[in-house]
Amino acid sequence: MKLLEGKTAIITGASRGIGKAIAIKFAEEGCNVAFTDLFYDDIAKTTEAELLSMGVKAKAYASDASKFDDTQNVVSQIIADFGAIDILVNNAGITKDTLLMRMTEDQWDAVISVNLKSVFNFTKAVQTVMLKQKSGSIVNMSSVVGVSGNGGQSNYSASKAGIIGFTKSIAKELGSRGIRSNAIAPGFIITEMTARIPEDARKQWEATIPMRRGGLPDEVAKVALFLASDLSSYVSGQVINVCGAMNT
């Protein structure tokens, strides 16, 4: 029996990177996957095709996770298409890194809206379905910089720290209805986003990690699978660092 057989998950920002790795891992375990990204482009179509080839139901949706009404509409469409929502993975996120003295209001607002408000938007939208089912698992993607902070990332750190507070609060609000809420705090994960960091800077980062390497998206996906499945049936309100002991 596969861990997520017959379940349906929504994963935001899943056309590439960590989100895509989670979508593939879930599909491998029998989960039907609805995923969103800002555009239904060739990248989203490729991911959609990969998931469908694994024998599960899968569909990509264009959605701006930072927009409340847009989120309500896309979740309504997903419910109509899939009939249920058992798992929500709030993964959509952006960075606009700079020192506070140079940071513009737009850079602050954009990161808070996409990273933090999106978590509110999607959790609010799926809450009714999960409450009726009296079951559900919500997995929110935070970051080690949301736990410990990082210079030049005050907007990103604030958004990811906010996710942790939200996660713990929702776990307490919804726990009596069989709904769990947990967060993952990845460290330095090798994705397209981190690949843009200059090689010398990347090596400096890796030297500070006790395991002496960056993590892989699949390694984050395995933790998401644990939190989404019944393997973690009594785990809620927690933050799991996936960082090679970078943040202990």
Image (tube, rainbow, N blue to C red):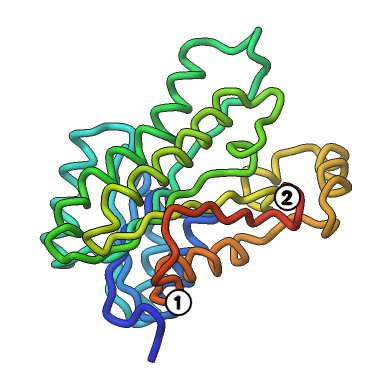
Marks 2/1: CA–CA distance: 24 Å
For residue 77, above or below residue 103? below
Q: Earlier in the sequence, mark 2 or mark 1?
A: 1
Using the rendered image of the protein, determine whether residue 43 is visible from the camera's viewpoint: no
Residue appearing at x 24%, y 66% in the figure:
135
Q: Nearer the viewer, residue 136 or 54?
A: 136
Which quadrant holds the N terminus?
bottom left
Q: Is residue 45 left or right of residue 111?
A: left
What is the quadrant of residue 48 in the picture? Answer: bottom left
x, y percent for residue 60? 31, 57
The residue identified by callout 2 is 248
x, y percent for residue 99? 68, 16
Please state which amino acid type lies under the numbered disc 1: Leu
For residue 242, above or below residue 105? below
Residue appearing at x 53%, y 53% in the figure:
184
x, y percent for residue 132? 12, 61
Residue appearing at x 29%, y 57% in the figure:
175
Residue lying farthest to the top in this orientation: 101
Mark seen at residue 231:
1
Residue lying farthest to the bottom in this orientation: 1
Q: Nearer the viewer, residue 74 or 60?
A: 74
Please state which amino acid type lies under the numbered disc 2: Thr
Which class describes the residues within 10 Å of circle 1: few (<14), some (14-19), or many (20+)?
Answer: few
Residue appearing at x 82%, y 51% in the figure:
209
Mark seen at residue 160:
none
What is the quadrant of residue 109 in the picture? Answer: top left
x, y percent for residue 178? 26, 64
Q: Is residue 172 left or right of residue 203?
A: left
Considering the numbered disc 2 on the image, is that residue within a helix, a strand or a loop? loop
Using the rendered image of the protein, determine whether residue 187 is visible from the camera's viewpoint: yes
Q: Is residue 228 left or right of residue 136?
A: right
